Amino acid sequence: MSLPSRLLCALYSLTSLWLAWYSVRQYQYGGSAWSVPLFAVASIVPVIAVVRESVLADEHRTIAVLRRQKGRCTTNRDELCEAIACAELNAACCERWWTSRATDHDPTCPHQRRSNAA
Ligand SMILES: [Zn+2]
């Protein structure tokens, strides 16, 4: 994760803590009925932003690895997305594993014996 992303995550975290703290303060001092749940829910939004930021960082890291593996410096986003999809599919198991929600494998799958024994 880059420095600006880390700073952004720190800002999101502080905002989330402040909103949660403000929600508690509203509850303690008898704030209006709508303000307590509103600030409580609002304190969750920055947490979602932190998760989103980490997903983006993972994607950037994957793109950098794929660029190094391919030995090229392409900026074509479609090629990179295709390479990411291929890498994800290659990391997965066989087609039957996908369609059976990981309960069965193709007869030729090297993971079949281990799965059936379990
Ligand atoms: Zn399989």
Image (cartoon, rainbow, N blue to C red):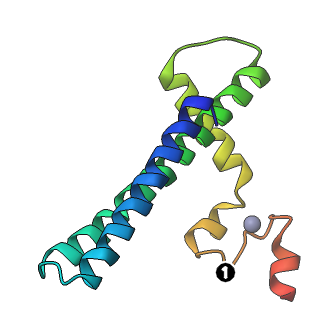
- Residue 51's place in the image compared with 66, above or below, is below
Residue placed most toward the observer, 28 or 92: 28
Q: Where does residue 19 sit, x and y in percent of width and height?
A: 34, 63
Residue identifier under label 1? 103
Quadrant of ligand 1: it is bottom right
Q: Residue at x 54, y 37 (%)?
A: 7
Corner quadrant of residue 46:
bottom left
Is residue 82 something that shows in the picture?
Answer: yes
Is residue 48 something that shows in the picture?
Answer: no
Q: Secondary structure at mark 1?
A: loop
Q: Where does residue 109 sit, x and y in percent of width and height?
A: 80, 64
Say which quadrant the C terminus sits in.
Answer: bottom right
Residue placed most toward the observer, 106 or 69: 69
Q: Where does residue 58 sit, x and y in percent of width and height?
A: 62, 42
Q: Residue at x 37, y 65 (%)?
A: 44
- Residue 103's place in the image compared with 11, above or below, is below
Q: Residues within 10 Å of mark 1 (few under 14, many from 20)?
A: few
Label 1 CB less than 8 angstroms from ligand 1: no
Q: Residue at x 45, y 59 (%)?
A: 47
Q: Where does residue 83 sit, x and y in percent of width and height?
A: 62, 32
Image label count: 1
- Residue 33's place in the image compared with 17, above or below, is below
Tell me if 8 is positioned left or right of 92 in this view. left
Tell me if 30 is positioned left or right of 8 in this view. left
Say which quadrant the N terminus sits in.
Answer: top right
Tell me if 72 is positioned left or right of 33 in this view. right
**Kind of residue sitting beneath label 1:** Thr
- Residue 2's place in the image compared with 27, above or below, is above
Corner quadrant of residue 86:
top right
